[in-house]
Image: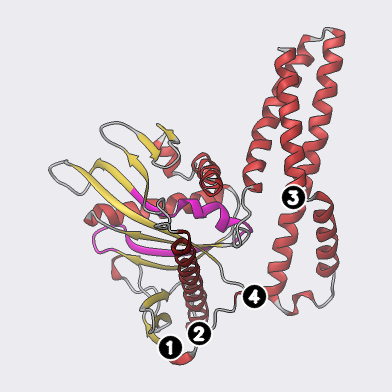
Amino acid sequence: MAADFSVVLDELNTTLASIEAVLDVDRLRREVAELEQQAAAPDLWNDVEAAQALTSKLSYLQGDLRRVEELRSRLDDVGLLHEMAAEEGDEATTAEAERELWALRKVIDELEVRTLLSGDYDSREALVTIRSEAGGVDAADFAEMLMRMYLRWAERHKYPVELYDVSYAEEAGIKSATFAVKHPYAYGTLSVEQGTHRLVRISPFDNQGRRQTSFAGVEVLPVVEQTDHVDIPENEIRIDVFRSSGPGGQSVNTTDSAVRITHLPTGIVVSCQNEKSQIQNRAAAMRVLQARLLARRQEEQRAEMDALKGEGGSSWGNQMRSYVLHPYQMVKDLRTEQETGNTSAVLDGDIDGFIEAGIRWRRQQEAA
């Protein structure tokens, strides 16, 4: 076991050194110091939105720095501990060092995945839209199951979520929902979840108890920032207001505060009804529209590059995961082959294994 311990320790030292190089720890320390200085400014909270963005970024970078420094310290300590225990023939301490090494391996692997997020918008917050697709009421129910799955995932990680719009289906479930995951790197992390998700189960809505296959689509966009320059002239949009409604069409608002914006040149329609005021809903809907237009611009640029390279474009964006609840229990990613039989845990937000496998798979595809 001593030889195995040394091999794993060497591997982890190499991996952590690579992570330290990618994160550029010295630059990270300088950036944290600069942000701490800005956060100490007496007029910081004069602009609440800017202050929240600054403190959120500072907190995230402080966490990154603390995590990598602690891992380096723990890795150095575990090597010394194992060496001393071996010299003294202390089996209990040797076992303790081995447990610590395997714990470190898991944490370092997770941090390595984070360093693979190096795309132009990967560091952004995420805007997630879920839509029911083929499958009638089962698809609407499945869309709501997926919404709950992602909200539970965010809750597990203590990531703030802002719900912008939910359109409820008549019998059960939802037609669509849009929400923001307000945490750095949420876009890079969740972008591998984009595509069509498939559910196979005995339909609870079929009185004959037949098996039903239904589909729901997941769209993930980066939240737009001021530097993106997504300008939308007023004469290119139509704004309609309507009364917010909840499940079953029950009124949850007594004023016409919900907002629907139609972008006339592209036909893109977005709506927001979560906020109490029309002004807040309009601002939130404009953020969603800007994100959709930014994504459209990215797609056009990618299409131009693919045309220049003689390629047919991306081939991995459509059906990407199956959730089978009958006749057996399995969730399987169709791109990475990642799978588990614990379907209830996945639908309760335990999707980190699928996300990490997706990020590694995407990097391999880009490298190829």
Considering the numbered disc 3 on the image, is that residue within a helix, a strand or a loop?
A: helix
Q: Position of residue 288 (x, y in %)?
A: 48, 72
Check disc 2 and report its element: helix, strand or loop. loop
**Element under disc 1:** helix
Q: Which residue is mark 3?
A: 23
Q: Position of residue 139 (x, y in %)?
A: 28, 54
Of the residues under marks 1 and 4, which one precedes in the sequence?
4
Q: Are marks 1 and 3 in contact (CB under 8 Å)?
A: no
User: Looking at the picture, does residue 330 appear above or below residue 253?
Assistant: above
Answer whether labels 2 and 1 touch (C-beta < 8 Å).
yes
Residue for badge 4: 227
Q: Earlier in the sequence, mark 3 or mark 2?
A: 3
Give amino acid for label 4.
Thr
Between the C-alphas of marks 1 and 4, the distance is: 21 Å
Task: Give me the disc on residue 236.
Answer: 1
Label pair 3/2, CB-CB below 8 angstroms: no
Residue range of the region highlighted in magenta in the rendering: 169-197
Callout 3, which amino acid? Leu
Residue 109 placement, left or right of 255: right
Q: Residue at x 79, y 39 (%)?
A: 70
Is residue 263 shown left or right of residue 139?
right
In this picture, is 1 found above or below 216? above
Q: Residue at x 46, y 51 (%)?
A: 193
Give how far apart the Cα atoms at labels 3 and 4 are. Answer: 23 Å
Is 172 one of the magenta-colored residues?
yes
Q: Which residue is mark 2?
A: 232
- Dot 4 falls on a residue whose secondary structure is helix
Q: What's under tag 2, amino acid-wise?
A: Ile
